Image (cartoon, rainbow, N blue to C red):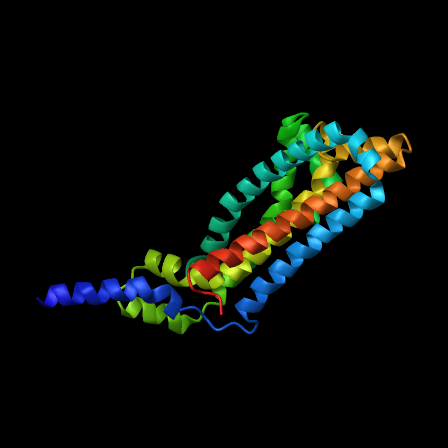
Amino acid sequence: MRNRGHSCARDYATSVLPPMFMEQKGVSMTNRYRNAIVGAAITILVVVAIGWSIGPAVIHHYQGDLIYYTERHLYLVGCSMSLALLCGIPAGILLSRPYFTRHAEKWMQLFNIGNTIPSMAVLALALALFGIGDKPAIIALWLASLLPIVRNTYEGLKQVSPSMKEAAKGIGLKPLQVLFRVELPNALPIIVGGVRTALAINVGTAPLAVLIGGESLGGLIFPGIYLNNQDLLLLGATATAVLALALDAIVSLGSNAYLSKRGLLR
C-alpha cells in the first residue's frame, strides 16, 4: 500500500513538473508570441514590397531559376542546420555538466572556428579537404552555425536555478529526468534564440557556396555581379533576405506554439 501511494505521488509529480518548474521570465512569453505574429506579418509585407519593387516581369522571366536555386539553397541550409543541431545541442548539454563546466570556455573556442575564420577561408579549406560541390559547402555552413547553438544551449542550462534542480532530485527524479523535465524546458527559449541566430548566419552565408561548386541563391547573385545585371543581382539578394526572414518567423512561431501547447506561455 505504501509503495502504491509512493508510486502515485511520483507519477503525479513527474506529470506536472514541467509547468511547475518553469521560471518566471522578465519578458512575458505572451508578448513573445505576439511579437512573433507581428514579425510574420511584417515579413509578408516585405515580400509584397520587394516583389513590387523588382517588378512582376523580372520575377516571371527568372521564375525557373529562382525556384531551382531557392530549393538548392534550402537543401544546403537544411542539411547544415540539421548537423549543427545534432552536434550543437548535445555539446552544449555536455559542457553544462559539472565535470566540464570549469573548462567550458576553452572547449567553446573549438566551436568558434567557423566564426573566427572568415567565411571565404572556411569555404576554401572545405574545398581543399572535401572537393567541389555541395559537400564542402554543407561542412562550411555547419561550422559557421555551431557556436550560437552550443553557446545558447550551455548558457540556457546554466541559468536554470539550482534550487529547482535540487527540488526535482528531492522528489526522486534521476539526472536524465531532471535534464529533460526541468532543465531543457526552462532553457528552451534561450536555445531557440541560438538556433535563430545560427539560421540567420547560415542563410546569409549560403550564397557563397556557389564559389566552390555548391548551388544556392548565389547562382543568381554572382552572375548578376559579373554581367552587371542589376535585376538578377537584386532578385537573388532579396530572395536570400526574404528566405532568412521567413525561416526566422517559422522557427519563432513554431517554438512559441510548442510552448503554448504545453501551457508554458504566460
* Left/right of residue 244 with respect to residue 178 in the rendered view: right
One can see residue 153 in this view: no
Q: Position of residue 172 (x, y in %)?
A: 26, 65
Pick out the residue farthest to the left: 1
Considering depth in this image, is 164 or 101 the residue closer to the camera? 164
Would residue 89 be seen by someone viewing this image from the given angle?
Answer: yes
Report whether 94 appears left or right of 75: left
Q: Position of residue 23 (x, y in %)?
A: 46, 71
Count of marks, rendered view: 0
Residue 257 at x, y percent in the picture: 50, 57
Residue 212 is left or right of residue 55, and the answer is left
Q: Residue furthest right?
A: 228
Q: Residue at x 91, y 33 (%)?
A: 228
- Residue at 47% x, 60% y is 259
Residue 190: percent from left, percent from top: 54, 61
121 relative to 254, above or below? above
Would you identify the image quadrant in which residue 30 lies? bottom right
Q: Is residue 197 above or below residue 71?
A: below
Task: Name which residue lies at 65% across and 38% down.
Answer: 140
Instruction: State the quadrant of the N terminus.
Output: bottom left
Position of 111 with respect to 172 (left or right) is: right
- Identify the residue shown where x is 50% and y is 67%: 159
Quadrant of the rendered image containing residue 233: top right
